[in-house]
Amino acid sequence: MQKLNAELTRLYLAPPAGGTRSISLAFKRLAGDGEAGHWERLCQVANALQAELGLPAPAVSISGAGAFGLWLSLEKPVTEAQAQEFAALLCPEAESAAAALPPYLDQASGKWAAFIHPGMGASFAGDEGLDMQPPEAGQVALLEGLESIGPAPFAQALDQLRRPVGIALQPSPPAPEASATPRGLLLKDATLEDIVNFLHSKNIEPTFRFLK
């Protein structure tokens, strides 16, 4: 677990002096969402973070208990009040809380929370958890390319969110051909070939669960 702990420390853990280096948003299914409405809302927010606020791509997770999550990494700690304000302005419908970092076993559901490849999100709608502990190598591969938000971009984004207009969340674009996939942007769907190619690029041999 050393490599995974190192990545989690690099991205999300704050020094003992205080503050937080992570902002997490939980997307639970709301009335009228249907099977994957909460996933589509996550995609809209994640794409707006990058396209409209100019911030790095966030990590995506499943909670093990019926929710998807977005994880924003901050280069320098901010106060809890600043983090909560940012989350509330970004997406009032999502829950912001001091959630435990994946992967972990949700004791109530018996399923594992884990970071996931964004292209696989729609396949977890309705069953947002893993039956088995995710491999460490896979979790590391999903985190190692992520960047933290610097102090200046964070302050600029927070100022933009505070304006009355805020940001306009646009529907997620349809998934294009693999060769044209925008780097970083979250798409609602990905082909099996896209996912396998990504995992192979990280020297990971994928295994897929079978749904009955």
Image: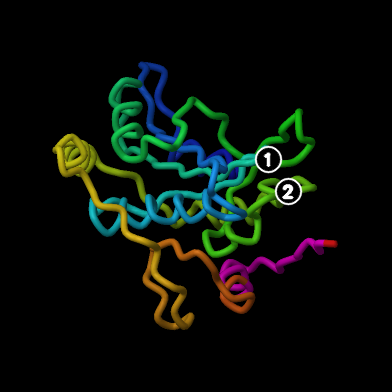
Vertical relation: 178 (above or below) 28: below
Q: Is residue 161 rendered magenta in the image?
A: no
What x and y, as percent, mark residue 13?
A: 45, 31
Residue shown at 42% from the left, 37% from the top: 93
Residue that carries the numbered disc 2 in the rendered image: 130
In the picture, residue 207 is in which quadrant?
bottom right
- The one nearer the camera, 184 or 45, is 45
Residue at the outermost front position: 32
Q: Where is residue 155 in the image (x, y as percent from the top left)?
A: 18, 36
Magenta residues: mostly which secondary structure?
A: loop
Q: Is residue 2 left or right of residue 154?
A: right
**Label 2 amino acid?**
Leu
- State which tag comes first along the sequence, 1 or 2: 1
Looking at the rendered image, the quarter that the C terminus falls into is bottom right
Q: Name the residue under label 1.
A: 64
Q: In which quarter of the image is residue 160?
A: top left
Instruction: From the viewer's side, name the closer residue of 41 and 99.
Output: 41
Q: Quadrant of the N terminus?
A: top right
Residue 21, numbered label: none
Crowding at dot 2, Cα within 10 Å, few <14 / some 14-19 / many 20+, comes out as many
